[in-house]
Amino acid sequence: MKVTIIGGGVAGLQTALTLKSLGIESIIVEKDNALGGKLRGWHKLFPTMTPAEEVLNPLLDGIKDANVEVLLSTEVLAFEEDGVQTS
């Protein structure tokens, strides 16, 4: 079984890593040309003022190390009984 995760923001990245730790394969479908969602455009996180890259980079490294399949610049067009249809 492979789980399709729609969106490659922080929640999608963490979901893929959690699933991987449980032995479940996933694929991330992201409409933008890069992972990270809104966090890519942030400088620091409130209220701790943690640099955004200190949160994002370990997630991106984890996705790469876990060999999670990623489809960039791809949108989900429809849900089907056996998966999703993408553009």
Image (cartoon, rainbow, N blue to C red):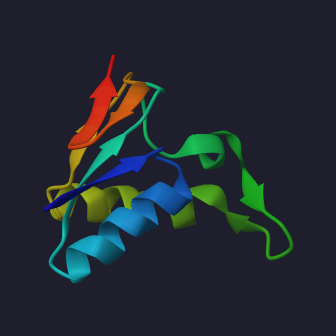
Residue at 20% from the left image edge and 54% from the top image edge: 68
In the figure, residue 19 lies in which quadrant? bottom left
* Residue 22, placed above or below residue 55: below
Q: Quadrant of the C terminus?
A: top left
Q: Nearer the viewer, residue 32 or 50?
A: 32
Residue at 43% from the left image edge and 67% from the top image edge: 14
Res. 26 in view: yes
62 sits to left or right of 68 = right
In the figure, residue 70 lies in which quadrant? top left
Percent coordinates x, y for residue 5 in the rendering: 38, 51
52 sits to left or right of 34 = right
Q: Nearer the viewer, residue 44 or 9?
A: 9
Res. 58 in view: no
Percent coordinates x, y for residue 73 in the rendering: 39, 22
In the figure, residue 79 lies in which quadrant? top left
Q: Nearer the viewer, residue 69 or 34?
A: 69
* Residue 55, placed above or below residue 33: below
